[in-house]
């Protein structure tokens, strides 16, 4: 079913309407849904008529609009048939939920009415007026509200025909809790992830102008996702184009969207961060634990002074171990908005609370029945969790639920840690005058994107849902991105983020677009670097040369041009540019080494050795000795090569050092010495699970040039095999 629908959608996206119609007709016959045949016939007849007018040369200014409408009808037919088939036969989680709940759910209008009746103000007024037992009735009211809230979510998520008017009433209501409105936005987004609907995209677009930032930013995240997922079909929908044009007139909308695009891109770093925590930081901290235990007086840990003052010896241990630098790196990433807690809280998503799909999208609510008891007598804990800028809503629920299950002493320890973090955040707020508005909104959208990431990566039935984070690095290439006409500064902001994080293909695409409007040496340099990092040295060289025309005699650029020429085996040009670089930085030993290497490539061994000796005078290291030794061997100076390989082997020789030293010994007829050196090389090759003989075969031309006969080589290799 899915493959057929996908094939039809591909035909439509590529403007192959006739093939799409044929595939639709064949599909209906295969699945026996003959009630849609008349719709396909009507679509085909209208298309045939339009084609005939076009062939007859009839001038129709509305032809493109007519074509778009026909394509939209074909999209709708495909979506409708697919949805009907999946609802009947799919074992996917969402479709099993549709089959279970579709006869149980009330109308959205009735649900909205219930939410208004259950609003907090009315409940409190009712309890006071009736003078009832507030505690027991409060729990009943909470349970009733949560049940209605879940019904609202399922209605918007699962029902095929969403009541747009009731949805607008829900968002416009002054009495419905903002938590419920935000929850509704997530449900509508999940509905759109499952199936395209232009009207629902319009509802999200309207919600992007909502007065409450929590609602507005969830809507914008959902809208960005929907526009990316359905990118190929959007050009056929003029209404969406017009709605986006209106939104883009608001500079705040464009600014928030740029932030969200970067935040989505940042999720691509989450797995790397989790891996770093799991494989580098945590193991190192575990190694430190015994030393820390010896250094710290645990008997005094309960005093206020001990809570606040870090043990300097502990800090010294961390710094010496190298963990300090990694922890600072994590802190910096956290300040940027990176998801550093994914690995930690992934282990806390097995509570029954997360068995209910809607709860993954629920804004953190201290009045929720699952956590309300925790905060009943501890307002400080509630505020610490509510105000934590770095925990997403899903993780706040995980933490609150886990805190309910631990001892009071442990709970106090955790609270103290969060209190320290909150104080640090307060300090940051004092240094940022716009913290209360702009930064808060960034936090809201970032936390919500992290909520989505956890659902699509950790939910038990996640494989039944579209992997929406596949689009995390694609927003810049979508149709709507160009439609919004973002400023050059905003596009550059996204490009620079991609560039800084090593997403060079994505960065290049944006830099290239920007370069058409602005001739800038810095831009050309970065474009060249992007191409260099993706091993496209020809194009990298092209952009570096463009930059050089605007910025001549710049050291970094000159070296990059030399490097690309070297990788392209343009050795003469590479040598020329490395010599220019040497003029600009005469004390740079690496440049001198590169010049020596290029002389070796051109078999100008005497000139190469002159450069290598110059470097050795300044810095005598095994790296330089290797270059001198190999060049000496190639130039027939075997005694000199032998002396340098002897120095290298006294240090920390590699498998190639032993291999090359063996070549030198053999070239001097010292066959037994050569075999001993080769044997040591073989041992190191085996440790690396590498092939000694493959490396040896690559050096055969040099051995022959040194005077070793072709016939002797297989004999020596067989002797070596007997030895090892």
Image: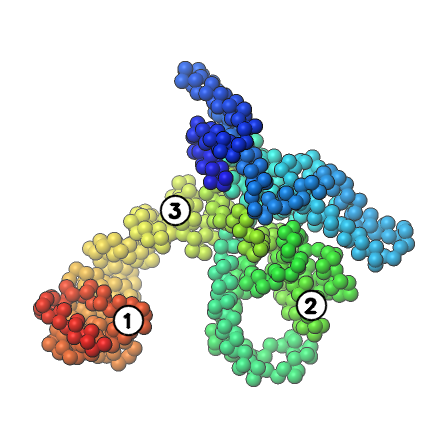
Q: Position of residue 625 (x, y in %)?
A: 24, 73
Cα distance between the residues tagged 3 and 2: 59 Å
Residue visible at 51% across and 23% down in the picture:
41
Q: Which residue is mark 1?
A: 685
Residue visible at 70% across and 66% down in the picture:
404
In terms of secondary structure, where does tag 2 sit? loop
Q: Position of residue 700 (x, y in %)?
A: 16, 65
User: In the rendered picture of this protein, how many numbered marks are placed on residues?
Assistant: 3
- Which circle, 3 or 1, is nearer the viewer? 1
Q: Which mark is residue 520?
A: 3
Q: Which residue is mark 2?
A: 405
Q: Position of residue 343 (x, y in %)?
A: 55, 63
In the rendered image, the vertical position of residue 585 relative to residue 144, given as above or below: below
Cα distance between the residues tagged 2 and 1: 53 Å
Badge 2 density bin: few <14, some 14–19, many ≥20, Cα 10 Å: few
In the rendered image, the vertical position of residue 220 relative to residue 568, given as above or below: above
């Amino acid at each position: 079913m899915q493959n057929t629908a996908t094939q039809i959608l591909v035909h439509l996206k590529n403007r192959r309407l006739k093939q799409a119609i044929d595939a639709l007709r064949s599909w209906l016959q295969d699945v026996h849904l003959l009630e849609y045949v008349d719709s396909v016939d009507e679509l085909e007849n209208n298309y045939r008529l339009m084609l005939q007018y076009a062939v007859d040369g009839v001038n129709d200014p509305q032809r493109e609009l007519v074509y778009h409408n026909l394509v939209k009808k074909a999209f709708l037919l495909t979506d409708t048939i697919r949805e009907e088939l999946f609802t009947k036969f799919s074992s996917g989680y969402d479709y099993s939920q549709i089959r279970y709940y579709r006869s149980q759910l009330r109308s959205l209008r009735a649900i909205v009415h219930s939410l208004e009746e259950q609003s907090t103000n009315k409940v409190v007024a009712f309890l006071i007026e009736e003078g009832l037992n507030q505690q027991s009735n409060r729990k009943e009211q909470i349970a009733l509200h949560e049940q209605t809230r879940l019904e609202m979510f399922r209605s918007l998520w699962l029902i095929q025909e969403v009541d747009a008017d009731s949805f607008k009433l829900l968002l416009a209501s002054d009495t419905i809790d903002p938590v419920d409105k935000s929850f509704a936005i997530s449900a509508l987004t999940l509905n759109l992830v499952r199936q395209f609907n232009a009207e629902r995209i319009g509802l999200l677009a309207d919600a992007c102008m909502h007065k409450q930032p929590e609602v507005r930013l969830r809507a914008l995240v959902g809208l960005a996702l929907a526009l990316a997922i359905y990118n190929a079909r959007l050009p056929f929908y003029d209404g969406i184009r017009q709605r986006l044009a209106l939104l883009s007139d608001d500079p705040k909308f464009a600014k928030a969207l740029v932030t969200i695009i970067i935040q989505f891109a940042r999720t691509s770093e989450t797995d790397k961060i989790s891996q770093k925590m799991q494989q580098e930081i945590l193991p190192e901290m575990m190694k430190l634990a015994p030393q820390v235990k010896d250094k710290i007086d645990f008997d005094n840990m309960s005093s206020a002074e001990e809570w606040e003052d870090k043990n300097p010896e502990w800090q010294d241990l961390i710094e010496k171990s190298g963990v300090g630098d990694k922890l600072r790196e994590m802190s910096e990433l956290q300040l940027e908005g990176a998801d550093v807690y994914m690995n930690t809280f992934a282990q806390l998503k097995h509570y029954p609370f997360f068995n209910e799909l809607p709860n993954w999208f629920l804004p953190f609510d201290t009045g929720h029945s699952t956590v309300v008891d925790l905060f009943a007598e501890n307002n400080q804990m509630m505020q610490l969790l509510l105000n934590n800028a770095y925990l997403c809503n899903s993780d706040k629920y995980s933490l609150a639920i886990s805190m309910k299950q631990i001892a009071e002493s442990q709970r106090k320890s955790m609270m103290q840690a969060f209190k320290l973090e909150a104080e640090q955040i307060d300090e940051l707020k004092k240094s940022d005058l716009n913290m209360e508005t702009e930064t808060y909104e960034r936090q809201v959208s970032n936390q919500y994107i992290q909520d989505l990431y956890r659902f699509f990566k950790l939910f038990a039935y996640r494989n039944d849902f579209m992997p929406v984070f596949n689009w995390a690095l694609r927003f810049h290439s979508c149709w709507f991105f160009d439609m919004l006409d973002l400023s050059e500064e905003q596009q550059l902001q996204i490009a620079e983020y991609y560039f800084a994080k090593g997403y060079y293909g994505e960065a290049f695409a944006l830099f290239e677009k920007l370069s058409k409007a602005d001739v800038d040496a810095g831009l050309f340099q970065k474009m060249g670097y992007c191409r260099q990092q993706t091993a496209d040295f020809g194009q990298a060289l092209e952009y570096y040369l463009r930059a050089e025309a605007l910025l001549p005699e710049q050291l970094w650029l000159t070296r990059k041009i030399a490097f690309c020429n070297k990788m392209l085996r343009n050795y003469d040009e590479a040598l020329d540019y490395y010599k220019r670089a040497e003029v600009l930085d005469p004390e740079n030993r690496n440049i001198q080494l590169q010049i020596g290497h290029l002389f070796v490539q051109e078999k100008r061994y005497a000139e190469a050795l002159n450069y290598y000796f110059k470097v050795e005078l300044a810095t005598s290291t095994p790296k330089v000795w290797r270059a001198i030794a190999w060049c000496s061997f190639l130039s027939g100076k075997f005694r000199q090569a032998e002396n340098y390989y002897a120095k290298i082997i006294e240090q920390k020789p590699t498998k190639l050092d032993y291999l090359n030293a063996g070549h030198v010994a053999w070239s001097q007829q010292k066959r037994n010495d050569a075999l001993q050196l080769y044997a040591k090389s073989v041992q190191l090759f085996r440790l690396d699970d590498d092939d000694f003989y493959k490396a040896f075969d690559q050096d055969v031309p040099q051995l022959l040039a040194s005077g070793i006969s072709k016939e002797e080589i297989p004999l020596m290799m067989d002797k070596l095999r007997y030895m090892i």
